[in-house]
């Protein structure tokens, strides 16, 4: 008798008509063979094997360089279940609109079967998935990003306990591109894109959209969050998770190098993009990183901004849409000081004309988590780590101060629900526009966002020792348009205050929006920051916040009567305090 997995693979093969089917075992030998094939076909290009051993460059189709949110759908039975922030079509509509695009779409290609585990292999919180794809580049990425291969296949065995995800490159045309989710069946179809979060179905499709749906039903949280560890001079370790929208600093924050290492403060990395969080027996919130690699933003990554990332991506990594020097080194804006090297090939593979950027602004690295020098010893702890703090943050030139603390859990949920950020190159469309992005989950929540807020509030009531909640903004600018805060490793100074506050220490002053650091309570020794800049960074301007609160209201109104009363109460409290 064929297993559910075998039956599904056969069914998909009859439908998409691949020339052959390959079951991935995740072995070194398989990896070598596939890489060799992609090099021969020009899907990958070898980088300098001395300076970047095991590294390759991939150039995606120029029309396929970022997630396409307008082509991403949540296909629940009713539109109401998907809510006002998701694109919706009915499951039946999805079958008639998207199904035909998959019909025969793998002709002449190989169908790869990728079994994978999200989370440490022995974690009670792990989940199993299988991606079927006709892209060998997706296979190579999934091998880095997940625990892929034999072990996953064994854990699936004859059961149907896996999330089926079907992906085909189709003809790569944006006119025939769809990323559709069927939460009720826990199923994903993606066609017409080979890029990142559109095509690596373990990541945003399963890890967030479907997982957030499962999490609500089962009483946990699936969030767009990094997870980090802070070691104190006493040797004590505490943990925090932070949600910043795409390309707003999660990877950098998770890998930051402490400027206070000589004093005994050290940061270690657990995850950089997704956190799955459960209520522990001790009433605390525990987090695991479901992923096994990083799919990170390349531009501006440098020895200065993120030396841990530079080490991590120095071998066995895939670079997507970066530029290349004549001696086959990957190159990107912000990599090093000084003028760009001569003779660059841009991300499209053309001689660089010096006009636009040489590397695409959303160029990415795919690198194994095990190569990260700052990796925490508990990064693959099956139980996860207990969180002391949750941090929300956005990219805002104005309004939110460097850091503030929410008064309690419900206020923290309000802060997360109303946060906003300027759009970046991580999604197609215009950049630099302020949009509300609740909990950095706007493009990733698999159901009605008002129900998601209710779920957050309910989770708080189940936590005996809830993490304290904060909001940060590294991106506030001065009158000259320059960032007021140096950012990157210096963000540790803010993290210190956050974790002190979470332990009931650290000094704060009350403001209408929450608690901001008392000047002097931030550890700023050795940082050349003027008193005026600090004041500007911590300033809470009532006029600006009145306008901000009005925008909160307009945004929350869009959720209609499903919005939990507790959030309206928070809003009224904010307005009253202002
Ligand atoms: P996704 O992978 O898209 O989810 O992004 P991310 O949230 O992990 O963002 P990442 O850390 O890759 O940073 C995105 C961009 O913001 C990069 O160009 C960084 O150099 C820049 N950046 C990150 N942290 C800071 C900071 O503290 N200050 C400033 N000014 N820029 C930062
Ligand atoms: C993001 O856009 O938030 C990413 C990259 O982490 S992608 O995998 O394309 O979603
Ligand atoms: Mn992300």
Image (cartoon, rainbow, N blue to C red):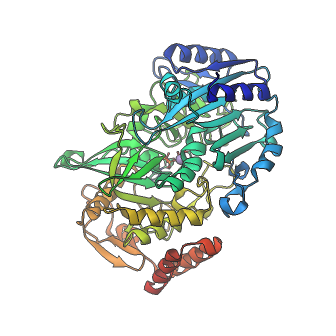
List x then y, in percent, for residue 193: 71, 37
Residue 362 shown left or right of residue 474 in the figure: right
**Residue most toward the left?**
234
Q: Which residue is at 49% across, 80% downward?
A: 569
Picture quarter with the N terminus: top right
Residue 325 shown left or right of residue 336 in the figure: right
Residue 394 shown left or right of residue 512 in the figure: right
Picture quarter with the C terminus: bottom left
Asked whether residue 472 is in view, the answer is no
Quarter of image, res 351: top right
In-front residue for pair 182/19: 182
Residue 406 shown left or right of residue 67 in the figure: left
Up-down relation of residue 503 to residue 519 (above or below): above
Quarter of image, res 520: bottom left
In-front residue for pair 541/552: 552
**Residue most toward the bottom?**
576
List x then y, in percent, for residue 63: 73, 40
Q: Which residue is at 63% across, 23% downward?
A: 44
List x then y, in percent, for residue 152: 50, 28
Up-down relation of residue 498 to residue 287 (above or below): below
In-front residue for pair 219/503: 219
In-front residue for pair 195/106: 106
How many numbered discs, if any?
A: 0
Quadrant hosting ligand 2? top right
List x then y, in percent, for residue 170: 77, 33
Up-down relation of residue 299 to residue 481 (above or below): above
Up-down relation of residue 79 to residue 411 (above or below): above
Asked whether residue 92 is in view, the answer is yes
């Amino acid at each position: 008798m064929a297993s559910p997995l075998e039956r599904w693979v056969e069914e998909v093969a009859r439908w998409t008509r691949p020339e052959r089917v390959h079951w991935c075992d995740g072995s070194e030998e398989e990896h070598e063979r596939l890489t060799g094939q992609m090099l021969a076909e020009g899907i990958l290009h070898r980088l300098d094997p001395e300076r970047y051993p095991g590294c390759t460059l991939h150039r995606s189709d120029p029309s396929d360089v970022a997630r396409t949110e307008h082509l991403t759908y949540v296909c629940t039975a009713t539109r109401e279940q998907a809510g006002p922030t998701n694109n919706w079509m009915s499951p039946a509509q999805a079958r008639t609109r998207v199904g035909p695009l998959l019909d025969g779409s793998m002709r002449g290609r190989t169908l790869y079967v990728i079994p994978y585990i999200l989370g440490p292999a022995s974690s009670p919180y792990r989940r199993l998935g299988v991606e079927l794809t006709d892209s060998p580049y997706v296979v190579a990425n999934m091998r880095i990003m997940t625990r892929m291969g034999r072990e996953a296949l064994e854990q699936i065995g004859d059961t149907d306990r896996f999330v089926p995800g079907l992906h085909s490159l189709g003809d790569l045309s944006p006119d025939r591109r769809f990323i559709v989710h069927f939460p009720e069946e826990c199923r994903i179809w993606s066609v017409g894109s080979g890029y990142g979060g559109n095509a690596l179905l373990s990541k945003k499709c399963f890890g967030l959209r479907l997982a957030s749906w499962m999490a609500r039903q089962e009483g946990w949280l699936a969030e767009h969050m990094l997870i980090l560890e802070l070691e104190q001079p006493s040797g004590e370790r505490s943990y925090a998770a932070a949600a910043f929208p795409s390309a707003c600093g999660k990877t950098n924050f998770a890998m930051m190098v402490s400027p206070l290492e000589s004093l005994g403060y050290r940061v270690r990395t657990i995850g950089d993009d997704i956190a799955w969080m459960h209520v522990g027996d001790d009433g605390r919130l525990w987090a695991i990183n479901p992923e096994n690699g990083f799919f990170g933003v390349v531009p501006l990554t440098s020895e200065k901004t993120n030396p841990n990332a530079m080490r991590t991506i120095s071998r066995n990594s895939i670079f997507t849409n970066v530029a290349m020097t004549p001696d086959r080194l990957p190159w990107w804006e912000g990599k090093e000081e000084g003028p760009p090297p001569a003779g660059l090939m841009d991300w499209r593979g053309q001689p660089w004309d010096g006009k636009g950027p040489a590397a695409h602004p959303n160029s990415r690295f795919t690198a194994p988590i095990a190569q990260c020098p700052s990796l925490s010893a508990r990064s693959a702890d099956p139980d996860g780590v207990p969180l002391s703090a949750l941090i929300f943050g956005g990219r805002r030139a104005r309004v939110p101060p460097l850091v503030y603390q929410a008064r309690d859990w419900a206020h923290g949920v309000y802060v997360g629900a109303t946060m906003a950020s300027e759009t970046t190159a991580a999604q197609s469309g215009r950049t630099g526009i302020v949009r509300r992005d609740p909990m950095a989950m706007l493009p990733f929540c698999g159901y009605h966002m008002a129900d998601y807020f209710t779920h957050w509030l309910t989770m708080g009531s189940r936590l005996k020792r809830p993490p304290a909640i904060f909001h940060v903004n590294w991106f506030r600018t001065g009158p000259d348009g320059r960032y007021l805060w140096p950012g990157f490793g210096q963000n540790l100074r803010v993290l210190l205050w956050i974790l002190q506050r979470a332990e009931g220490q650290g000094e704060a002053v009350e403001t209408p929006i929450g608690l901001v650091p008392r000047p002097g309570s931030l550890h700023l020794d050795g940082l050349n920051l003027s008193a005026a800049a600090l004041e500007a960074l911590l300033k809470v301007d009532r006029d600006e916040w009145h306008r901000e609160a009005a925008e909160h209201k307009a945004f929350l109104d869009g959720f209609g009567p499903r919005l939990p009363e507790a959030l309206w109460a928070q809003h009224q409290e904010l307005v009253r305090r202002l």
